[in-house]
Image: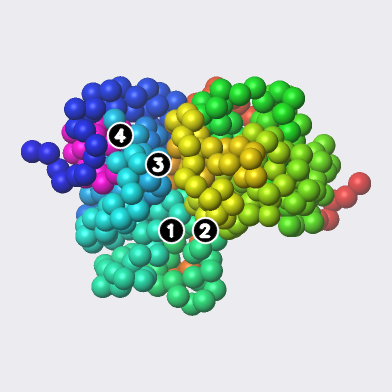
Amino acid sequence: MTVEHDVKQLDLATGGRYRIEWAEQEMPVLRAIRERFAKEKPLAGMRISACLHVTTETANLMHTLQVGGAEIVLCASNPLSTQDDVAASLVANYEIPVYAIKGEDNNTYYDHIKAALDFKPHITMDDGADLVSVIHKTRTELLQDIVGGTEETTTGVIRLRAMANDKALKFPIIAVNDSDTKHLFDNRYGTGQSTLDGIIRATNILLAGRTVVVAGYGWCSRGIASRAAGMGANVVVTEIDPLRALEAVMDGYRVMPMIDAAEVGDIFITATGDKNVIDGHHFERMKRGAMVANSGHFNVEINIPALEALSGKAPRIVRPFVEEYMVAGRPIYVLGEGRLINLAAAEGHPASVMDMSFANQALGAEYMVKNAANMAPAVYTIPADVDKEIARLKLEALGVKIDILTPEQADYLSQWEEGT
């Protein structure tokens, strides 16, 4: 019997299963964890509500948690990120309840979050902290059963740390994003490649010779800037942090305020986690044909209401995921409705990099089950030894070997007496 669900079409399941299996080939670390979970069942008896991007990689994480003994329900963490065939396959082939439809409206999005929370989870698994936020605002009765949660992305960690600082957070959260095997690889290499993939799929433009303005210079933005430069673009970085701005300068990029970048940019990409990074006064200075895309979690980084006010009329859809606004007679194009362009117009990160991110999620859930009783409501990072084990497994899967300290070398590094 089919489990409860709200997906686009169940008859898409076969194609979704093929794509899930294709991604699984690129996820050897998660596969090794799944094999151990199958034997040990570390999540037995746990109900997990997950609010993540519904992709082939996420499907492999859900299967791993299921094999580990957990009962799972999944909803989307972004209205445009769902892959409908994957959602159908999870329901039909893996018997996992899924509430996600690509392009769902705002009311449906929150109805799906409500459905996931009706599952009365012991563990939350977020990408953007929406589950945690809703629980603390309107579903406080669920707190008595929750042992903890995990958070996937930078924006969610920012929200959760704000809650913790305000003493509002009521259960412990593991910030998966803060693991080195997550943000150093997923954010940099995954976001770098998939963001440009989404922009190119949406527009079919040539990046070489264009001026690409990257807002922010965190790990995601570093990856975007690097990949854009590698494809021949002239990269401009905007920043508010002097250390990151200096690093961007040393990496060879021009750095300037957004108000100045607005006049020279051909393509603008935001990845800051803040709101109105591109605002009305920036749109007023943009050249004819400028393209604006967002790679941050929420669509608030681009002030679309301000652009609509400047335009005075509804945009014209000129290609899938490309909206044309007219500002003082000049067309300005917003890609993917200002939402995550790599998931709105493409398939998100490659499976090989999500392999490590979702290994962190699986091991984070296991760690929470084992240790939550001794954890106060706060934001935690996965222990360094777990992080290094994920890196070791990834190297092993890639066929890469590294050196091992000799006893003499290890002793030298642990003492202070011996010098020159």
Q: Which residues are magenta?
A: 86-100
Tell me the kind of residue under disc 3: Leu
Residue under pointer 4: 84
Residue under pointer 3: 80
Residue at 76% in and 39% down: 264
Residue under pointer 2: 157
Q: Residue furthest bottom?
A: 167
**Quadrant of the frame with the N terminus:** top left
Tags 2 and 3 touching, CB below 8 Å: no
| 399 lies left or right of 266 | left
Task: Please identify, in this view, whether the residue under mark 1 or under mark 4 is nearer the observer.
Answer: 4
Residue under pointer 1: 129
Q: Secondary structure at mark 2?
A: helix
How far is the residue under mark 2 from the one under mark 3?
A: 21 Å
Above or below, 256 relative to 206: below
First reached walking from the N terminus: tag 2 or tag 1: 1
Residues 385 and 132: in front is: 132
Q: Secondary structure at mark 1?
A: loop
First reached walking from the N terminus: tag 1 or tag 3: 3
Asked which quadrant contains residue 290, the reply is: top right
Tell me the kind of residue under disc 4: Asp
| 171 lies left or right of 198 | left
Residue 249: in sight, yes or no? Answer: yes
The crowd level at tag 4 (other Cα within 10 Å; few <14, some 14-19, many 20+) is many
| 90 lies left or right of 366 | left
Above or below, 131 relative to 190: below
Residue at 34% in and 24% down: 19
How far is the residue under mark 2 from the one under mark 4?
A: 27 Å
Q: Position of residue 334 (x, y in %)?
A: 55, 40
Tell me the kind of residue under disc 2: Val
